[in-house]
Amino acid sequence: MENLVEVKDVSFTYDVRPVLQRINMTVPRGKVVTIMGLSGCGKTTLLRLIAGWLKPTAGEVRVAGRATHELTHDEIYEMRRKMGMLFQFGALFTDMSVFDNVAFPLREHTGLPESMIRDLVMMKLHAVGLRGVHRRMPAELSGGMQRRVALARAIALDPLLIMYDEPFTALDPISFSAIGHVIRRLNDTLGATSIVVTHDVQETLPIVDYVYFMSDGAVVAQGTPDDIRNSREPFVHQFVWGEIDGPMAFHYPGAPYREELRLEPAHG
Amino acid sequence: MVERAVRGLRVVGHRVVNSVWRLGYASRFFSLTLLKSATSFRRFHLTIKEIYFTGVLSLIIIIVSGLFVGMVLGLQGYETLQKYGSAEAVGTLVALSLTRELGPVVAALLFASRAGSAMTAEIGLMKATEQIAAMEMMAVDPIARVIGPRFWGGVISMPLLAAMFSAVGVFGGYLITVVLIGVDEGAFWSQMQNAVDFRQDIVNGVIKSVVFGVAVTAIALFEGYDAPPTAEGVSGATTRTVVTSSLAILGLDFVLTAFMFRGA
Amino acid sequence: MERTVLDLWVGVFVAAGIAALMVLALKVGNASTTFNMGETYRLTADFDNIGGLKVRAPVKSAGVVVGRVDDIQFDNERFKARVVMKIDRRYQFPKDTAVSILTSGLLGEQYVGLDAGGDSATLKDGETFKITQGAVVLEKLISQFLYNRAAEGGAK
């Protein structure tokens, strides 16, 4: 089995609003794949489809060879035990200490003795470099540290697939590179596969193996980081080099500017 | 004109459809909570933790309010009854009003504003900060793990709190009328015991408080779970919890009273 | 918080709640008398009028509660009220005991009073009191009084 995740012709409609349109994507085992695009282009929806949280309106999502929409509730839960997900702002349980947060999936799913859980938690916290804060509450940590703790929690059960939902949002540059470094290292040492959803192009390109570009619910470009850097595609070019205007207009469509400011009489 | 009427009807229709939909969603949520409550009892320490947050932390407000309500009942009751020369009946008055009505109702109202609102805010924030989603992603069912223990914690706490409210209230009435005013102690207790019936008054009061406990906790948890994940969403849900559960308590109280004390 | 501390607090809370319930049941309510009655037997009595007597009203003899009213029915053949009482097994009453419906105080609750007679045979479970005196109805009393006064006036 070469590809851990295969997304085939997937469309998804929320109520009547189409969010994803005929998406095709493969995530090979052991690789770090990133999905880039502007906010609201359906990246998070795509992650939820992969996790079996949402069911595609058309097409299918295969994880380790099995179509998620054919799985029962229990089978989806079984599948998710082999997945870890890092949420945008960590989503740590605020009423538990750092230690209990990381221990949470272990206690819920393994039934291991408390002494062994302690060792495992310490190992996971060590992997993200935060063994020293295990007694603290999440509120006492900085945003970057919270996210690293959340990452330790996400890898507590040694997942096959780790998904990152905007892991770099609102981080200072040092936390930023720390997280990026950890993502790459965890992927290689755990032998896992990673999907990183982000819009931070420059910082993400060095750590990933393959890039998908999404816009308005469709894949518009893909390739290795080098392909992307050298891409002539106007959209990718605009995105990578952060140009204000291009195929993606800076202005959200609206009434003509002069009219809005009442510089000329309205029609009629 | 016609257009306007049509638009008005459409608004009404939309509202009705929305509220029916919400009611259905709430019922589904409630039945899921009941179905998945095995976790709350198999891992009872989760429920114990919630009894602590809903019950133990509400103790002070319940005891203080109960004492004052009982003392006021004693004062007012004495004031009125002594005009008819039956000041000893004040014990009956205090005990009956507390066990039948004020105990369950006032304790439930306090519980709704103290514990119910906290529950809604907590669940709403857990949802807004994606903690609920994170749990779901870790293959842990949030209804079984988060909602269930809170529900049972509230349902267990409520009758105990109501009983304490009534007991402390009777003590407050005793303090004012017997100790302070000097009503005969023997008459106070014996008249009370003659009038208050164990099944008719006390058991019915406990049944009421259990029903209120279920209603308040279910409303609080649903509002929290259904809250839009924003600051306004959570604060609006908290307000709705207090308003809805207060109305539910008073409405249910009327229905239960009508069934329990009909004609007897 | 430590789990043991939490358990302790919750334990205290539950114990206090149950204690409050016990206080309500035993000190405030009549559970003590209800439970203490233990073994009972049933006696019935027919009355012309029971006034405001209610189920669970006390049955007293010489001022002591000896039982409670268990059931009140209307006998459609003789047009009388049939009152079933549960009497404590410890107390036996002679066959010629007089039963009356009395009121405690001027406006108080109504109860059943038993005045023991001199018969040596006692009433057994399910038997009926023969001598009964129904509730006093105020309106009847007044009209009787007025009638008597009118009769006296006529005689003069």
Image (spheres, helix red, strand yellow):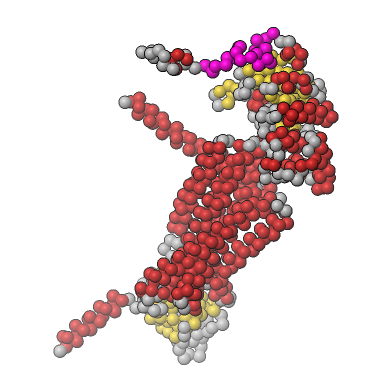
Horizontal side of residue A188 vs C23, given as left or right? right
Q: Residue at x 45, y 13 (%)?
A: A258
Q: How far from the left and from the top, in percent, is residue B29?
A: 58, 42
Q: How far from the left and from the top, in percent, is residue C82?
A: 42, 73
Image quarter for residue A5?
Answer: top right
Image quarter for residue A237?
Answer: top right
- So how many labels did they put on this image? 0
Q: Do we see residue A104 in this rendering?
A: no
Q: Is residue A255 above or below residue B226?
A: above
Q: Nearer the viewer, residue A55 or C121?
A: A55
Instruction: Look at the image and give the residue range highlighted in magenta.
Output: A232-253
Q: How far from the left and from the top, in percent, is residue B197?
A: 50, 69
Judged by its main secondary structure, the magenta piece is: loop
Q: Nearer the viewer, residue A145 or C54?
A: A145
Q: Nearer the viewer, residue B146 or A145?
A: A145
Horizontal side of residue C142 vs C9, given as left or right? left
Quadrant of image for the C terminus of chain B: bottom left
Q: Residue at x 70, y 37 (%)?
A: A142
Q: Residue at x 45, y 74 (%)?
A: B181
The magenta stretch spans residue A234: yes
Q: Nearer the viewer, residue C13 or C104?
A: C13
Q: Is residue B56 above or below residue B35?
A: below
